[in-house]
Image (tube, rainbow, N blue to C red):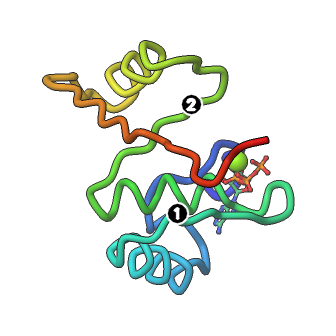
Amino acid sequence: MFFDLRPKENRRDLYGRDRELEELARLVESGSWVVVVGRRMTGKTSLVKTFAREFGGAYVNLTGVRGLEGLVEALHSQAGFKLRELTLDLKLLRPRGLGP
Ligand SMILES: Nc1ncnc2c1ncn2[C@@H]1O[C@H](COP(=O)(O)OP(=O)(O)OP(=O)(O)O)[C@@H](O)[C@H]1O
Ligand SMILES: [Mg+2]
């Protein structure tokens, strides 16, 4: 398992990332948007996949996905979510003080 080239998906196989997992959980639970960045092949995908599995989330790869229909299809095929309801909340943008 250690030499498996695929990203790791559970804590048992993910070596030395307990602190990062806990930090990710803390940030997500606080409602923050989190970006995981790092050099190539340092375990970013492994961290996020393990987090999703261990903390009741879902991992969805949106590479190449276009539009709302693509998003809905990806959520369904990769995470099993079915769209029951979709609410689109548009707020009007009114420029103030715009003029010649
Ligand atoms: N902490 C770790 N414990 C065990 N294996 C790891 C760990 N971090 C990375 N790996 C292994 O290293 C390889 C790269 O991991 P992963 O794909 O998660 O990295 P990445 O940062 O997402 O890579 P990329 O930059 O290509 O997207 C995989 O084989 C993965 O299993
Ligand atoms: Mg990756």
* In the displayed structure image, the side of residue 49 where residue 35 appears, left or right: right
Q: Position of residue 4 (x, y in %)?
A: 67, 47
User: What is the three-letter code of the residue carrying label 2?
Assistant: Leu
Q: Residues within 10 Å of mark 1 (few under 14, many from 20)?
A: some
Q: Position of residue 98 (x, y in %)?
A: 68, 47
Return the residue at label 1: 13
Return the residue at label 2: 62
Q: What residue is rendered at 62% in x and 52% in y?
A: 45
Image height of 53 relative to 39, above or below: above
Q: What residue is rendered at 15% in x and 25% in y?
A: 85
Of mark 1 and mark 2, the one earlier in the sequence is 1
Q: What residue is rendered at 56% in x and 31% in y?
A: 62
- Ligand 1 quadrant assignment: bottom right
Q: What element does badge 2 sit on?
A: loop
Q: Where is residue 76 in the image (x, y as percent from the top left)?
A: 32, 22
Image height of 82 relative to 13, above or below: above
Q: What residue is rendered at 26% in x and 57% in y?
A: 56
Q: Which residue lies furthest to the right in this view?
A: 39
| Mark 2 Cβ inside 8 Å of ligand 2 | no
Q: Quadrant of residue 83?
A: top left
Q: Where is residue 68 in the image (x, y as percent from the top left)?
A: 44, 19
User: What is the three-letter code of the residue carrying label 1?
Assistant: Asp
